[in-house]
Amino acid sequence: MLYLNKEQFQEMTGHCREEYPKESCGILAGKISPQSTVDSQRLKLVNKVYRMANVSEKPEICYFMRPAEQFKVFKEMRTLGIEMLGIYHSHIGTPAYPSQRDCEMAFYPETSYVIVSLQDFNKPEIRSFKILDGKIKEEKIMVQEN
C-alpha cells in the first residue's frame, strides 16, 4: 500500500494538471515501514515528491525521464536515506490503467506505478499498480487527510 499525505497528493496531481495536455512524470520517494502492513502489503510511506521533466519526443502520449535528472534524484535520495517507492505519470485522455508501453517501460519490479488520469480534468482518477513481467496487479493508495 502506498501512503501519501494530502500535500504530497496535491503536489502530484497539481503537477499533472500543470503539464496538461502533455503527460507529466515524477518519482515518489520515502521508506517502507518495517512493521506496518495492510492486507499483507508492506506500507510504503512517501516522504518526497520529485517532479521530473517529460523529455519524450511525443509528450502528449507518453513520458520519458532524462537519465541525468534521474541520477541526480537517486543521489539525493541516497543522501537523505530514502528510496524510490513509486513512479507517477499522467494519462491525459485514457483511464488510470497501465498501457502496453507503460508495461514495457516498467523496469523497477519493486516500484509502484501510479497513474493519474485527467480524462475528467476536474476530478482526476488515481490508481497504483505493481507491474512484473507484463502482469499488472493493483495496489491500494491511502491519502491522509491532515
Image (cartoon, grey):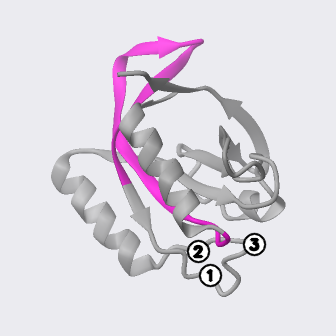
Is residue 44 shown in magenta? Answer: yes
Q: CA distance from mark 1 to mark 2?
A: 5 Å
Q: From the viewer's perspective, is 19 left or right of 69? A: right
Q: Residue at x 42, y 21 (%)?
A: 145
Residue extending furthest toward the front: 122
Instruction: Give the camera-side residue of 125 and 27.
Output: 125
Disc 3 to disc 2, C-alpha distance: 11 Å
Q: Amino acid at mark 2?
A: Phe
The residue drawn where x is 77% and y is 65% is 101
The rendered magenta stretch, by its main secondary structure, is classed as: strand
Where does residue 59 sit, x and y in percent of width and height? 66, 78
Residue closer to the observer: 136 or 119: 119
Residue 99 sits in quarter: bottom right
Please, what secondary structure does the residue beneath circle 1 have? loop
- Mark 2 nearby-residue class (10 Å; few <14, some 14–19, many ≥20): some
Q: Residue 58 is drawn in which quadrant?
A: bottom right
Name the kind of residue labelled 1 in the image.
Ser
Q: Earlier in the sequence, mark 1 or mark 2?
A: 1
Q: Residue at x 67, y 64 (%)?
A: 105
Looking at this view, name the residue that lies furthest to the bottom.
57
For the residues bearing labels 1 and 2, Cβ distance under 8 angstroms? yes
N-terminal label among 3 and 1:
1
For label 1, the residue is 56
Give the residue displayed 32% in from the left and 62% down from the top: 74
Given residues 145 and 112, the one toward you in this image is 145
Residue type, mark 3 in image: Ile
Q: List the residue tagged with mark 2.
A: 64
Verify CB contact (< 8 Å) between mark 3 and mark 1: no
Q: From the viewer's perspective, is 61 left or right of 76?
A: right
Specify the segment rendered in magenta: 21-49
Q: Which residue is mark 3?
A: 61
